[in-house]
Structure formats: C-alpha cells, structure tokens
Amino acid sequence: MIIGVAGTATLATDGLSATFVSAAAFDHATTYDLRMEVCADRASSTFTTDSCDNEVEEVFPLDGATDALYRTDIVARLDDPDPGAYITVDGVVGTTFVSGEVVVFQPDDPLDSGTTYDATVTYACSSESWSFTTSDVGAPTSTSPEGEVFSLDLTTGTFIEPGGSDIGLLIGDLFGDTELLLSVTDPPTTVIPMIGALGDGNGVQDVCVESIDIPDDPSYDDPYFQLEVDALPVSAISSPLTLDDVTLSGAFTADLAAIEGGVLQAELDSRSLFEVLGLPSSAPDDSVCLLFSAVGVSCEACSDGSGTYCLPVWIADLEAPNVGGTIVEIDAATAAANCP
C-alpha cells in the first residue's frame, strides 16, 4: 500500500512481487511512503515523483474579461505541448482541439450574451481555472448593414498565433498601419455580400490599390458573419506582405456602430519576410523559421504544398468601428491610373 493513496494492490501468483494501481494520478514532485506486508514480513520504502515544469502561459478570453464575444473559442496556451490537455467550461458542451502548445475549446452552440462562464484547462502537470463574461453583443441588428463601412486595424487585437505576446507584437509591427475596410453591398439573408479595401488610415478607401474581392458571399447568422478570401494584402515596414487562406469573422452591434469580437485566422509565408527582416534574398528558405524557432515558434506546412515555411496567424478580439463613407470596386488598371 501507499500511505494516503487510494488504489488496489495485487500479489503475483508466485508470491514474489506485488502491483499497486492508484485510483488517481500521483502528484508531481511528491514523496510517497510505500509499505508491504506479506505474512509476518514487512518492508517499507519511499519514492518521489518527477517534477513537471509545464505551466499555462496565457488564456483567452482573459481572466476577468467582460467583453468576450458570444461566439468565442476558449483557448489556453501551455509552455510545452501536451496532447492530452483539455478544456471544460461549466454548463457548456463542446470539443477540445490541441495543436502544439495551444488548447482550444469550441462550444457546440453560441454562448449566452452578458453571462459569466468558468473555464478550466487540465493538463498533465496540473489544472488552472479562470472566468470571463460575454458582452451584450448578440442581439439581431436593428437595421440592415447594407452600405455601412467598417474600419479594422489588425494591430489592435490579441495575438493567439504566433505564440507568445512578444512574437505577436513583432508580427503586428510588421503589419504596419494596415487599415482594412469592409462594407456590405446588398441586403443580407443567410449570406452577406461584402467588399473589402485597404484604407488610408483615416477610414477612407485608398484608391491607389485594388479593392479586395470577396467572391464567396460570407455566411451570416444575424449579427454574426464569417468570410473567406484567398489572400489579404497587409502593409509592412519596408515591403508589402500578404496573408493567405484568410478567415475573418465578427458580429455587428445591434445599432451597427461597430463590428466586435473579430477573429482573423490565416497563414503568413515566412519567406516573404526576408526583406522586412533585412535578410538577403539568397538566404536559405527556412532562415526566418530558424530565427523564430529560437523563441519557441514553429513554422507549419504551407497550404500550397511548397514546404514547411508558413507561420500561423490567429488574431482575436478585433474591433471595427463604423466609419461611414463608401467602398468602390477598383481593379489594377484603375488603381494605376488613379496614382500614376
């Protein structure tokens, strides 16, 4: 038996050994007393379980947050990967997905607006709980969003990927002052026709660049939308960058004053960062990946099959105020003529 531990002891048929199976996992870095008694013989010993250094690095929504979107995922980032980690949210049914150090809980149904939730991430070393409250966003819009223009600044959100707040800030800096404008072009139903454009930083369309075509009408469940585009141009300090395989979602406030709870997920080809980071074009393709690996960020396989050179980008908690105005469709020839 092990003192203070519930379990079952089984003596081998030859009487020379015994096996103890504990009813629950042992605590890490803990010393236990082992005692064995067979007939009149008694033996005792001690053993110490190994330590566990893995910890929760960050969670989303943040502990104590009061503005989480009712369609949010619940996320915990660990210091080290743990494939067996999982998240539970009191009173909510959902599924946990684990990718490296990131543990994601996706509710089966939208959360209730204006409600406090308790979440717990459980992993091999321990567990940690936190709470957050959803915002009041979630009620259907009072009027159609057709014709409204919203301004999204990609640097204002919370970076979940690439991991770590410092890396997220670095990638945010590379985006420069990118302003993405979104407008609804027709009355929405279960889809919401939209067009995009880069702004001049003041909520006005930049007529020197092409508008952004959104060929497949985004899905719409008033007030929530989700759109997909193959590529999204973003600014950089010294050269343009493009995010690929972009998914962008969010919810309109009831009065259409803003889009809140925006989430952008995409991939960024690290090879496009050579000029931005001052690397020669002759550098090996994995140079940026090696640089980022030094701080625990790993490249993943690019969706175009070109190799393991892409960085996942996941930005949450984006907001886009309604800035008025209009967006017009501009092709490459028109953009060039506008700014010769």
Image: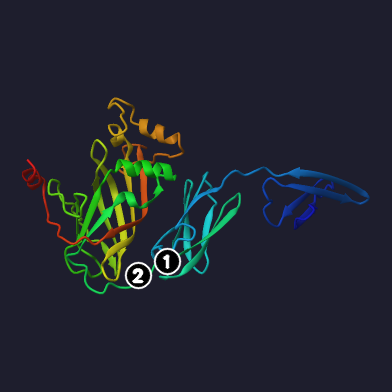
Q: How far is mark 2 from mark 1, CA to CA?
A: 10 Å
What amino acid is labelled 2 in the image?
Gly
Estimate the x, y position of residue 294 in percent, counting from the top left: 45, 34
| Rendered residue at 39%/49% (across/down) | 159
| Rendered residue at 38%/34% (across/down) | 289
Query: Does the CB distance between marks 2 and 1 fall below 8 Å?
Result: yes
Q: Which residue is mark 2?
A: 138
Q: Which residue is mark 1?
A: 134
Above or below, 97 relative to 192: above
Above or below, 140 relative to 259: below
Which element type, helix, strand or loop, lies under badge 1? loop
Of residues 259 and 16, the one drawn nearer to the viewer in this rendering = 259
| Rendered residue at 22%/55% (across/down) | 181
Of residues 100 and 203, the one drawn nearer to the viewer in this rendering = 203
Estimate the x, y position of residue 52 in percent, counting from the top left: 62, 44
Quarter of the figure with the C terminus: top left
Estimate the x, y position of residue 89 in percent, counting from the top left: 51, 64
What amino acid is labelled 1 in the image?
Thr
- Give the residue furthest to the front: 202
